[in-house]
Image: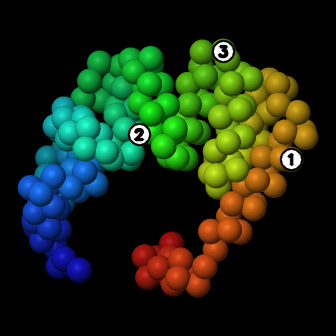
Amino acid sequence: MPKDDADTLAMVQARVAKKDPEAINDLGLDYCYGTHGLQKDASKAFELWTEAAELGSIDALFHLGVAYYNGEGVQQDMAKAAEFYTKAAMQGHVQARHNLGIVEKRKGNIIRSVRHWMISAKMGHKDSVDKRMFMVGGFATKAQYAEALKGYQDAVEEMKSPDRDEAAKLLGY
């Protein structure tokens, strides 16, 4: 384990030099939030996420979607946000799937938003079973909500393991 921010950054940068897409994504997060001694730089974060996505990072695709959605480091563009969320969701990124539901809701496509939330709930995404959000304008039925809730509970149960419990304890979750 690294002893301080400098050690952490050195470890990440060593992996970045070897073109590790997840390390490049992580360095983008460091620039985005100004962690590990780096100054916040949304443009640099966007640049790093673009590189990481080209190298295959699903998380970087998601972060590019967030950047376009919020207009951080790039001009706000909902169509581009949806495009990157879709790419990440198609590769199994749960939060990207959930965010697609939000994008569709903003566009007025309530039925599509509910479909996205059904999928992400069944993948174990807690926010996707928020009853207030899920039953938007009455377009989701109680049966759909019950199905999403059951899917969420099943996913959470499948993910339980002694190793995960121990890791959560060590990380303070």
6 and 111: which is toward the camera: 111
Q: Distance of mark 3 from mark 2, alpha carbons?
A: 22 Å
User: Which type of secondary structure does the marked residue at label 3 adopt?
Assistant: loop
Q: Can you give x and y, in whole percent of width and height, for residue 148 in the image?
A: 78, 46
Q: Residue at x 68, y 48 (%)?
A: 121
Do the residues bearing badges 2 and 1 touch, measured as CB atoms within 8 Å?
A: no
Q: Name the residue carrying label 1.
A: 146
Q: Distance of mark 2 from mark 1, alpha carbons?
A: 28 Å
Q: Amino acid at mark 2?
A: Phe
User: Which type of secondary structure does the marked residue at label 1 adopt?
Assistant: helix
Q: How many marks?
A: 3
Q: Distance of mark 3 from mark 1, alpha carbons?
A: 23 Å
Q: Residues within 10 Å of mark 1 (few under 14, many from 20)?
A: few
Q: Name the residue carrying label 2.
A: 62
Numbered circle sitting on residue 161: none
Q: Can you give x and y, in whole percent of width and height, for residue 115 in the image?
A: 71, 32
Using the image, determine if residue 155 lies above or below residue 109.
below
Q: Choose top left, top right, bottom left or bottom right for residue 70.
A: top left
Q: Residue at x 29, y 40 (%)?
A: 53
Q: Name the residue carrying label 3.
A: 108
